[in-house]
């Protein structure tokens, strides 16, 4: 069913996106706990590998007949490399920062994607997007420099967001021809293999039974969350669903408090709210652009 199928399809899609935000945040909370015991490369490889096992049958069915063409491979490789670096930096930050702070800073990726889209793709940046950039980066400053001094650790999720934005630029080129399921399949296979490279350094550790069970749970949450996102995006417009992604920040604050007893300070909390608001402003700008385009038709 296409996204324009009507309002009746919006509620199941919105519910699916909300549950996906919760599951993906719970997955990150488990991974944060596991970073104290297992190397980042190992976590990357095992999570993506196990998730592919869960998602592969559906992805192959959805993506049947949509194999990447010869012109797609440079963009697929660029997306996979950028996303792999992004995941590694995000996990590194996750091991050192509170869950909500790390996720909030990583959520600045749409802001960097706006800048890169203007620079690399010559996309127009309207007033709403410029306002979103200003609001979002004000939120970044509140989290990264609460006492007026920059915390270098906070640069890890910011650099992860930059890499994620670069992968989004490649994704925009890919989506002109390739299907989302195909892109997702290739990317997570690349991450799983890239994580295996840490075997050369001898960083891999044999997980305990409890750690293996938690990792399997994280992979199940991760893959289920991604599949729910695919379900939602196939049944409702992106402009309807985009704001619901930012519920992940509220879930991150809640899980950070329940699991680690961590609550953001007032400055960090204000920064999280501003970053979420900037995301909504980006969504509003996209919705306005789509509305004007339809009016011209």
Image (cartoon, rainbow, N blue to C red):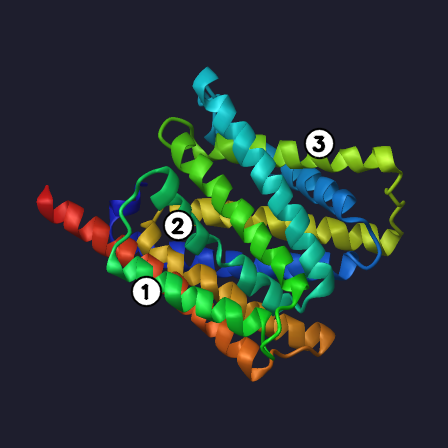
How far across and how far down the image is residue 245, in percent?
46, 59
- Residue drawn 85% across and 33% down? 200
How far across and how far down the image is residue 143, in percent?
56, 71
- Residue drawn 64% across and 71% down? 255
- First reached walking from the N terminus: tag 2 or tag 1: 2
What kind of element bears circle 1? helix
Image quarter (top left, top right, bottom left or bottom right) of the N terminus: top left
What kind of element bears circle 2? helix
Decide which of 184, 123 is in the foreground and name it: 123
Q: What is the crowding at mark 2: few (fewer than 14 residues within 10 Å), some, or many (at least 20)? A: many
What kind of element bears circle 3? helix
Q: Which residue is mark 2?
A: 115
- Give how far apart the Cα atoms at labels 2 and 1 are: 12 Å
Does 18 sit left or right of 155 as displayed? left
Does 197 sit left or right of 192 as displayed? right
- Give how far apart the Cα atoms at labels 3 and 2 are: 31 Å
Q: Which residue is mark 3?
A: 193
């Amino acid at each position: 069913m296409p996204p324009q199928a009507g309002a009746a399809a919006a509620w199941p899609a919105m519910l699916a996106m909300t549950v996906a935000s919760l599951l993906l945040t719970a997955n990150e909370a488990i991974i944060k706990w596991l970073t104290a015991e297992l190397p980042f490369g190992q976590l990357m490889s095992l999570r993506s590998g196990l998730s592919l096992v869960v998602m592969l049958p559906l992805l192959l069915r959805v993506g049947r007949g949509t194999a990447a063409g010869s012109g797609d491979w440079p963009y697929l490789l660029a997306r996979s490399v950028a996303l792999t670096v992004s995941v590694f930096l995000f996990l590194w930050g996750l091991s050192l920062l509170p869950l909500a702070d790390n996720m909030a800073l990583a959520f600045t990726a749409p802001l960097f994607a706006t800048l890169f889209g203007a620079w690399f793709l010559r996309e127009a940046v309207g007033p709403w997007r410029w306002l979103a950039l200003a609001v979002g980066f004000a939120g970044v400053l509140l989290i990264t420099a609460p006492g007026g001094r920059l915390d270098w650790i906070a640069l890890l999720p910011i650099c992860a967001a930059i890499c994620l934005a670069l992968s989004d630029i490649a994704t925009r080129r890919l989506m002109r021809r390739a299907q989302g399921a195909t892109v997702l399949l290739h990317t997570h296979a690349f991450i799983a293999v890239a994580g295996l490279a840490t075997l050369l350094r001898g960083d891999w550790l044999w997980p305990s039974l409890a750690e293996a069970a938690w990792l399997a749970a994280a992979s199940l949450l991760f893959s289920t969350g991604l599949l729910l996102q695919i379900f939602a995006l196939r049944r409702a417009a992106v402009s309807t669903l985009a704001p619901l992604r930012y519920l992940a920040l509220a879930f991150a604050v809640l899980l950070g408090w329940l699991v680690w007893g961590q609550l953001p300070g007032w400055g960090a909390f204000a920064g999280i709210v501003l970053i979420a608001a900037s995301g909504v402003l980006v969504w509003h700008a996209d919705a306005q652009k789509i509305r004007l385009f339809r009016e011209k038709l």
